[in-house]
């Protein structure tokens, strides 16, 4: 039993170590897709959260307000299929995805 438990723990550790790498690639199937862009938008929601990554669960770092103009540098679709744009301090690579992200559904343009 002790040998089986050690084998299960080692397998779980290997799987756990590999999981962060699966979603880190830029455009792998089932993960997310990003492309650079240069597009101007107008905010249509009264008060729109700006997130630290392209997820509604990511930390809110600022807000943009209705009728304000924003410029997008990156256009991404997260693993849930939701479209987001990066409007500043953008970094999109294999190691990290950071910046000032706004849900594209709250923008027109």
Image (spheres, rainbow, N blue to C red):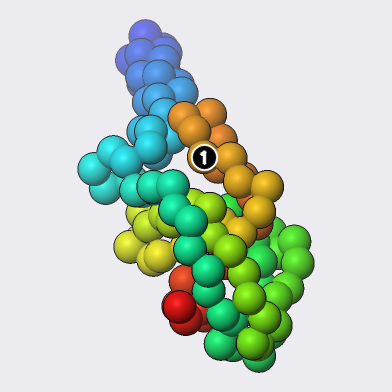
Q: Residue furthest top?
A: 3
Q: Please tell me whether residue 50 is drawn above or below residue 14 in the rendered image.
A: below
Q: Position of residue 66 (x, y in %)?
A: 65, 87
Asked whether the viewer can see residue 41, the reply is yes
Residue at point 38%, 37% (across, down):
26
Residue at point 46%, 23% (across, down):
17
Q: Position of residue 97 (x, y in %)?
A: 55, 42
Q: Please tell me whether residue 10 is drawn above or below residue 50 in the rendered image.
A: above
Q: Position of residue 75 (x, y in %)?
A: 43, 56
Q: Nearer the viewer, residue 72 or 54?
A: 72
Q: Label 1, on which residue?
A: 92
Q: Please tell me whether residue 51 is drawn above or below residue 49 in the rendered image.
A: above
Q: Please tell me whether residue 60 is drawn above or below residue 76 in the rendered image.
A: below
Residue 51 lies in quadrant: bottom right
Q: Residue furthest right?
A: 62
Asked whether the viewer can see residue 103, the reply is no
Residue at point 59%, 81% (across, down):
43
Location of the N terminus by quadrant is top left
Residue 21 lies in quadrant: top left
Other residues around mark 1 within 10 Å, as few (<14) / some (14–19) / many (≥20): some
Number of marks present in the image shown: 1
């Amino acid at each position: 039993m002790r040998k089986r438990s050690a084998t299960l723990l080692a397998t779980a550790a290997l799987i756990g170590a590999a999981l962060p790498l699966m979603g880190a690639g830029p455009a792998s199937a089932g993960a997310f897709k990003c492309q650079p862009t240069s597009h101007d938008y107008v905010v249509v929601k009264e008060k729109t959260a700006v997130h630290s990554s392209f997820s509604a669960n990511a930390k809110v770092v600022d807000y943009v307000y209705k009728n304000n103009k924003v410029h997008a540098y990156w256009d991404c679709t997260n693993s849930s299929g939701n479209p987001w744009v990066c409007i500043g301090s953008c970094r999109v690579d294999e190691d990290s995805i950071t910046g000032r992200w706004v849900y594209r559904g709250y923008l027109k343009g």
